[in-house]
């Protein structure tokens, strides 16, 4: 096999896997927002409990929800604080929400990539190898 052909076939395989990764990300990104947002909305203690060690490694998370009715009835304000062992507090709501969304993204991306990406990569590999064998003739014919 010529070096030029090998590079072209390798490039074709890389393009096929890139398409598979892009398709998996295209499916996972909006789905992760929905899954993570619903999880936080339905049971925030469970959602933030999943990422507690990453958000607050030296202390514990304290979640509070304050209900107010002067803007809109039923409006709630979430607070997520990391309480360190020395008693100091820091607001980690943004980090917690981003990590929950990241976990949801990975929970969707990995299966979608395994279901669609790996077979597409295998097909790309087999097709490029078949093209190489057809363009070079039978093995041992040289």
Image (cartoon, rainbow, N blue to C red):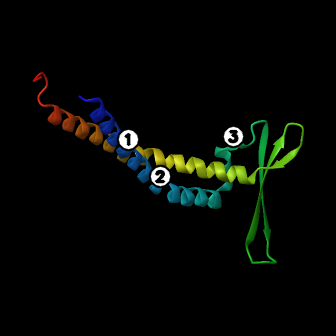
Residue highlighted by disc 3: 54
Gap between marks 3 and 1 measured at Cα: 33 Å
Q: In this rendered view, identify the residue nearer to me: 47 or 142.
A: 142
Gap between marks 2 and 3 measured at Cα: 23 Å
Q: Considering only vertical position in the picture, is 17 above or below 26?
A: above
Q: Considering only vertical position in the picture, is 118 above or below 70?
A: above
Residue highlighted by disc 2: 25
Residue 121 tag number: none
Q: Looking at the image, can residue 42 be seen?
A: yes
Gap between marks 1 and 2 measured at Cα: 16 Å
Residue 14 tag number: 1
105 sits left or right of 47 in the view: left
Q: In this rendered view, identify the residue nearer to me: 136 or 58.
A: 136
91 sits left or right of 128 in the view: right
Helix or strand or loop: what does disc 2 sit on?
A: helix
* Percent x, y of residue 138: 11, 28
Badge 1: how crowded within 10 Å, few (<14), some, or many (20+)?
some
85 sits left or right of 12 in the view: right
* Proximity of marks 3 and 1: CB atoms separated by less than 8 Å: no
Q: Quadrant of residue 57?
A: top right
Q: In this rendered view, identify the residue nearer to me: 50 or 119.
A: 119
Q: Earlier in the sequence, mark 1 or mark 2?
A: 1
Taking the spot 36% from the left edge, 47% from the top edge, the residue there is: 116
Q: Quadrant of residue 122?
A: top left
* Percent x, y of residue 46: 65, 50
Q: Earlier in the sequence, mark 2 or mark 3?
A: 2
């Amino acid at each position: 096999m010529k070096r030029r052909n090998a590079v072209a076939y390798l490039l074709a395989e890389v393009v096929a896997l890139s398409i598979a990764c892009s398709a998996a990300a295209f499916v996972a990104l909006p789905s992760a927002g929905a899954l993570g947002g619903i999880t936080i909305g339905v049971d925030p203690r469970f959602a933030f409990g999943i990422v507690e060690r990453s958000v607050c490694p030296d202390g514990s998370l304290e979640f509070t929800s304050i209900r107010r009715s002067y803007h809109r009835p039923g409006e709630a304000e979430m607070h997520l604080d990391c309480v360190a062992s020395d008693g100091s507090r820091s607001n980690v709501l943004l980090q917690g929400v981003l990590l929950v969304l990241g976990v949801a993204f990975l929970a969707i991306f990995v299966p979608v990539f395994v279901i669609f990406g790996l077979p597409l990569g295998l097909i790309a590999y087999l097709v490029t190898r078949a093209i190489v064998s057809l363009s070079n003739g039978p093995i041992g014919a040289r």
